[in-house]
Image: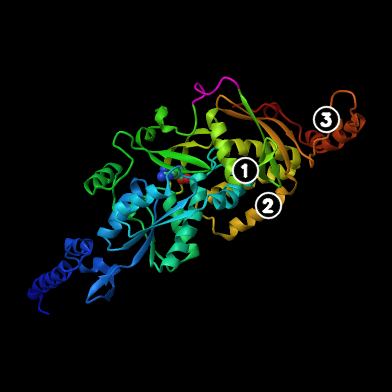
Amino acid sequence: MKAPLLPIYIWLARGHIRSTLRRSSIRWKARALVKSASLNQYSNLSHYANGGLPVPEKIVLAYSGGLDTSVAIRWLKLERGYDVVALTVDVGMDRSQEELQSRAMAAGASSHVWRDAQETFIRHFAFPALMAGARYQGHYPLATALSRPLIAREMVGVANAEGATAVAHGCTGKGNDQVRLDVSVQALAPHLKIVAPLREWEMHRESEIAYAEEHKIPVSVTKASPYSIDENLWGRSIETGVLEDPWIEPPADVYAWTKSAAEAPDDPAYVEIGFEAGLPVSLDGHLVDPVVLVKRLNALAGEHGVGRIDSVEDRLVGIKSREIYEAPAGITLLTAHEALESLTLSKEQRRLKNRIAQEYADLVYNGLWFSAHHQDLAAYIQSTQRHVSGVVRVKLHKGTATAVGRKSPKSLYDFSLATYDKGDTFDRNAAVGFINIWGLPVRVQSQAQTLGEDDIAPSP
Ligand code: ARG
């Protein structure tokens, strides 16, 4: 083909596509196809059927009903020509299936799949992290981070069932969630293509909101309240807007699950949490199913202002970010669980387990759920929990959760050894011999290497 003729061929081809598609009842395909002259954009319309009409490939989009994923549906359809299956994995959200389905369809999805994963999430993701004592950088109980591998697993399951060739998510290119979802999908189904519209199409929240308005995509976010929120049973994560200034105190409207300490009742509430081998199984003496247990604690502890976290954390992608969390049940359970471990684990077990907790929290935060390293750590943690059974009484009051009582049939606490009162069985005379041996190396060293003034109190 001679170079000067090329534009004519492209023009003819576009005209042919236009006239073919004009006959089609599927309008969006036409809009997508004539929008740009670049034909390689339509690589997802590679299968032809029905007299030359392209059949779009299927993509499974993790859909939460929020701004990012609603905009993503439209983008995947218009810009990439995909047939979008919107998948909502319910890990504890206060939106109904009907509401999300109609939103997804209004945004342009061809179908909506709903997976109730609440129980799986609590049993297999949140409770193992509770047993580990995992809090990223000492604060964050990892609600969002823990949900991502489960969502990825469901995406892969639906993609396989639907014959999809790709999966998609609404994560931006600056966060941790893109890493967690991508790495998890790659671990489970390396053949699937991963598309992240908000990573490819550098949109800011304002432009996303404008895009949603322009395309009449129903979203609940408004320009006045531009928080990015992710929530599940284990906690609520809030970012963006005024929170991006770490000097500004979070406004009251950031919080939805917790009262402020000032508004919380003046009288404390007490709750007795029962554990079996590290897992919470009862509240106030009644056996409760894991999901119900977490929901009840979220309500009760939230009422007393427990579980608010305001922190600056280090993202995996190297950015420091200001994060607000609400995790009433998570914080209450972690407090209770730690109290029970103090009674049932030895000093050495507690010491090593604390280190493992940090390693585990980092692993979850950094998206390495589907890794051998995780399996190894989980095996260790599981083993430490075999005697972590008993009851902890927690006092919830004005924003604090405090363990004020603990008991266990496997307790290592021995009253007769600990008491300063009558009934003391500790052999005080043995202490003299013990100190003699314990201090031996110190005595030897202080004689051989005489300590100077500076060694005793080093000058600054
Ligand atoms: N920084 C937290 C994490 O990486 C929370 C992310 C929350 N995501 C959101 N869309 N608000 O786990």
Q: Which residue type carries mark 1?
A: Gly
Q: Is 369 on the left or on the right of 241, as rendered?
A: right
The residue at which mark 3 appears reads as 418
How many C-alpha atoms fall within 10 Å of the one at disc 3: few (<14), some, or many (≥20)? few
Q: Is residue 15 above or below residue 423?
A: below
Q: Quadrant of the N terminus?
A: bottom left
Task: Tell which residue pokes out farthest to the front in this image.
Answer: 98
Region rendered in magenta: 260-267
Mark found first going from the N terminus, 3 or 2? 2
Element assignment for label 1: loop
The residue at which mark 2 appears reads as 382
Element assignment for label 2: helix
The residue at which mark 1 appears reads as 133
Q: Quadrant of the C terminus?
A: top right
Q: Position of residue 341 (x, y in %)?
A: 71, 40
Q: Position of residue 174 (x, y in %)?
A: 38, 48
Quarter of the image holding residue 204?
A: top left
Q: Nearer the viewer, residue 159 or 202?
A: 159
Q: Which residue type carries mark 2?
A: Gln
Q: Which residue type carries mark 3?
A: Ala
Residue at image x 63%, y 54%? 377
The number of discs equals 3
Which label sits on residue 191?
Answer: none
Say if residue 417 shows up in the picture: yes
Give the dominant element type of the magenta stretch: helix, strand or loop.
loop
